[in-house]
C-alpha cells in the first residue's frame, strides 16, 4: 500500500458534477488500497470573485483580512467534496490548513510553508480515512490565516507529499500533461511522457504555466515524484522527476514563448572597466531583474549594452537609468516592448552539439530576425519581434519535433 497525494485545481472542482468526478477519482484510488490525501483549490473563479468583492468594500484592505477572505474559497471545496465522498459511503474528513498543521511564515498574501505538523493527518490516515486538505493556506505564528500566493495549492500539495513521504503526488488540472509547446497554438505539439524538474522550471518560467514554480522547486528539493494529469480525460499524464529515461537520446523537451519581456539598450557607453558593474548594480538596487544581457565590442572608445527586463519593469528601469545618465555616461537609451523570447529547453542539450545551429536555421528559414541570444546548460533563448513570435515557435518546434515524431 502506498500513500498518494492528489491535488485538484479550480476548474476540476468548478461545479457539483466536477466535484463528484473528483470524488470518484479519489475513491477509486482509495479502493485500490492506497492511503489518499487530497488537496483542493477554490472552485472555478472563486478566488478572483472574492478579490473583486473585497475591492468593492475596500480597495486597500489589509493583507491579513484578504487572507481571511481568500482562504474561504478552498474551505468550500473541501467541505463539498467531503460531502460527495461521504455520499458514496466512504470515511472522509476535511481539514483547513490550520487543522492540517500547515505552518507558514507571517507574509500574508505570499506566505512560505515552514513546516507541517502532520500528526492530525497521520491519525486520520491510520483510521483509514480519506483526508481532504484546503490548499493555498496555512497559519502563522500569530495563529492567523495566511495564503501562499496565487496558484499556491500546487505548493501545498507538494509540501504535504514531501512531509508525509508520499510515494506520488498527482497534480490534476484541465490540461492532461506537459506538452512540447502550447498545444492550443502550435501544430504538432504533443504530450511528454516525462520531463525533468529543471526543464519544468524553465518551461514554467517561460510561460508554460502548468505548475506553480515554487511547487516544482520544492519537489526537486525533496525529490517528490510528481505527475501532471487531467481530471477529465482519465489518460496518463506527464511525470516530473530528477532524471528521465529519454534524457540521453532526446535533447530538447519543449519550445516556449514568453511575451513578458522588454529590451533596453544603452548606446554610446564609455569603453572602460566598471561600466557594466555600474549599470547592473544600479538596476539591482532598484530591484529590477535583468535577463538576457548583450554587450557590443567597443569601437572608437564607445560600446553599447542591451538587456531585457520584465515588461512591467521597463518604465521604472528607463527612469532609473535616465536619472543616472551623467554617472553612467551614455548617449542615448532605446526601449522596446514589442519583443518576445522564444526558447528551446532540454536537459540533454549539454551533451549534444548543434542544438543552437538547428534553432537558428529554423528561424532563418522562416525569415525571422534574431535580436539577442542567450544560452544555459538546458536552454537556448532568442529575442525576436513580438509579431514574429508565434511563427518562430512553430518553426522551431517543426524543426525539432516534426521530422521523426518524437523529434531530435
Ligand atoms: N485558489 C487560489 C488561486 O486561485 C490557489 C490555487 O488555485 O492554487 O490562486
Ligand atoms: Mg484557483
Image: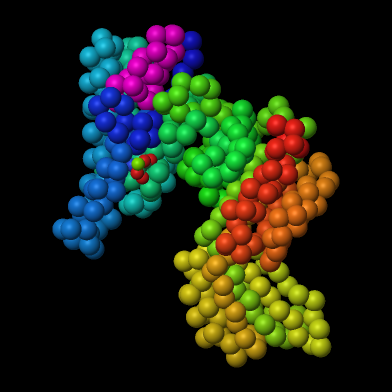
Where is residue 316 shown, x and y percent of the image? 48, 75
- The residue range painted magenta reads 19-38
Answer with left or right where residue 266 lies relative to residue 42: right
Q: Is residue 32 magenta?
A: yes
Q: Examine the rendering and report whether any part of residue 294 can be seen.
A: yes
Asked whether residue 201 is in view, the answer is no
Magenta-span inclusion, residue 11: no
Q: Nearer the viewer, residue 106 or 232?
A: 232
Q: Position of residue 111 (x, y in %)?
A: 38, 48
Q: Position of residue 261 (x, y in %)?
A: 55, 63
Q: Quadrant of residue 183?
A: top right
- Outermost residue on the bottom side: it is 326
Which quadrant is home to the C terminus?
A: top right
- 252 with respect to 288 (left or right): right
Q: Is residue 66 left or right of residue 364?
A: left
State the residue at coordinates (70%, 32%): 406
Name the foreground residue: 53 vs 406: 406
Percent across and percent down for residue 36 are 40, 19
Ligand 2's quadrant is top left
Can you name the residue that lies furthest to the right here? 353
Q: Residue at x 41, y 26 (%)?
A: 232
Nearest the viewer among 103 and 197 is: 197
Specify how the rendered protein is coloured.
rainbow
Instruction: Tell me the residue at 67%/82% (across/down).
Output: 267
- Figure check: 375 above or below 283: above
Number of numbered discs: 0
Question: What residue sits 69% from the left and 43% below the top?
Answer: 398
- Helix, strand or loop for the magenta stretch, by majority: helix
Amino acid at each position: 500500500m502506498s500513500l498518494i497525494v492528489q491535488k485538484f485545481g479550480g476548474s476540476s472542482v468548478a461545479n457539483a458534477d466536477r466535484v463528484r468526478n473528483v470524488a470518484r477519482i479519489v475513491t477509486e484510488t482509495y479502493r485500490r488500497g492506497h492511503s489518499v490525501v487530497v488537496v483542493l483549490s477554490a472552485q472555478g473563479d472563486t478566488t478572483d470573485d472574492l478579490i473583486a468583492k473585497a475591492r468593492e468594500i475596500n480597495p486597500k484592505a489589509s493583507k491579513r483580512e484578504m487572507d481571511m477572505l481568500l482562504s474561504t474559497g478552498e474551505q468550500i471545496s473541501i467541505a463539498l467534496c467531503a460531502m460527495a465522498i461521504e455520499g458514496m459511503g466512504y470515511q472522509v474528513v476535511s481539514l483547513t490548513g490550520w487543522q492540517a498543521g500547515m505552518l507558514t511564515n507571517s507574509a500574508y498574501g505570499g506566505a512560505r510553508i515552514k513546516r507541517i505538523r502532520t500528526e492530525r493527518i497521520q491519525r486520520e490516515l491510520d483510521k483509514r480515512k480519506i483526508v481532504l486538505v484546503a490548499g493555498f493556506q496555512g497559519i502563522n505564528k500569530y495563529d492567523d490565516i495566511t495564503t501562499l500566493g496565487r496558484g499556491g495549492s500546487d505548493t501545498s500539495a507538494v509540501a504535504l507529499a514531501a512531509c508525509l513521504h508520499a510515494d506520488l503526488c498527482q497534480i490534476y488540472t484541465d490540461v492532461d500533461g506537459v506538452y512540447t509547446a502550447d498545444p492550443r497554438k502550435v501544430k504538432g505539439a504533443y504530450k511528454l511522457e516525462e520531463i525533468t524538474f529543471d526543464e519544468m522550471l524553465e518551461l514554467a518560467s517561460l510561460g508554460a504555466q502548468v505548475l506553480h514554480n515554487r511547487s516544482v522547486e520544492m519537489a526537486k528539493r525533496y525529490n517528490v515524484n510528481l505527475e501532471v494529469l487531467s481530471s477529465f480525460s482519465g489518460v496518463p499524464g506527464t511525470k516530473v522527476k530528477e532524471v528521465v529515461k529519454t534524457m540521453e537520446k532526446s535533447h530538447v523537451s519543449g519550445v516556449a514563448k514568453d511575451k513578458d519581456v522588454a529590451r533596453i539598450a544603452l548606446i554610446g557607453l564609455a569603453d572602460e572597466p566598471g561600466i557594466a558593474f555600474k549599470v547592473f548594480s544600479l538596476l539591482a538596487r532598484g530591484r529590477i531583474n535583468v535577463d538576457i544581457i548583450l554587450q557590443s565590442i567597443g569601437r572608437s572608445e564607445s560600446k553599447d549594452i542591451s538587456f531585457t527586463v520584465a515588461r512591467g519593469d521597463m518604465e521604472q528601469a528607463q527612469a532609473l537609468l535616465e536619472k543616472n545618465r551623467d554617472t553612467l555616461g551614455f548617449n542615448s537609451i532605446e526601449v522596446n516592448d514589442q519583443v518576445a523570447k522564444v526558447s528551446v529547453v532540454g536537459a540533454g542539450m549539454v551533451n549534444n552539439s548543434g542544438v543552437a545551429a538547428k534553432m537558428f536555421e529554423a528561424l532563418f528559414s522562416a525569415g525571422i530576425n534574431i535580436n539577442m541570444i542567450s544560452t544555459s546548460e538546458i536552454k537556448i533563448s532568442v529575442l525576436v519581434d513580438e509579431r514574429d513570435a508565434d511563427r518562430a515557435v512553430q518553426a522551431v518546434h517543426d524543426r525539432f519535433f516534426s521530422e521523426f515524431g518524437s523529434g531530435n
